Amino acid sequence: MKNKILAVIGGTIALFGLGYLIYVVLEFHAMNGPGTEAIQADLNVPAIITMEVLYAVLLVIIYDRWAQIKTFSTGAQAGFIIGAFLGGLPALELFATTSDLTDIPGVLTGAATFAIRFAFAGGIVGWFLGRD
């Protein structure tokens, strides 16, 4: 149980830290179309932290119950794939259903940024789950 809690905490810190670096410091965004100025608002940090905790819990459940992932490298590989889907699919949905919120480079950016974040967080989660 202790390893699972540490895995959630480590995954949350990794997701939030890389998210801050990628989205705030480096300013990479999946929504980069001309209509995004109308919908951008101030960051709701408590909601972002809650989201990152839930993402980390999702990784812990998948890794511990179904995938039996217990190493950093295996966790990073699985996290990369999971993150690419979690980032790319909503961006692709925005591209398919709106006229000016994102474009194909935005879809690829969404998939890539999530893949990177989840690869690192997934590695940390896997490492914590494998500790004795």
Image (cartoon, rainbow, N blue to C red):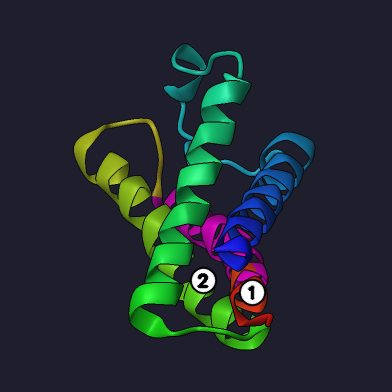
Residue segment shown in magenta: 104-124
Q: Is 81 or 47 nearer to us in this picture?
A: 47
116 versus 106 height, above or below: below
**Which residue corresponds to mark 1?**
123
**Residue under the image location 40 percent in, 65 percent down:** 61
Q: Amino acid at mark 2?
A: Gly
- The 10 Å Cα crowd at callout 1, few under 14, some 14 to 19, many 20 or more, is many
| Residue 79, numbered label | 2
Q: Is 20 or 51 nearer to us in this picture?
A: 51
Task: Tell me if label 1 and label 2 are in contact, CB under 8 Å.
Answer: yes
Relative side of 78 to 22, left or right? left
Residue 66: x and y in percent read 33, 79
Q: Is 82 or 7 nearer to us in this picture?
A: 7
2 versus 21 height, above or below: below
**Residue under the image location 48 percent in, 38 percent down:** 51
Cα distance in 3D space between marks 1 and 2: 7 Å
Q: Quadrant of residue 86?
A: bottom left
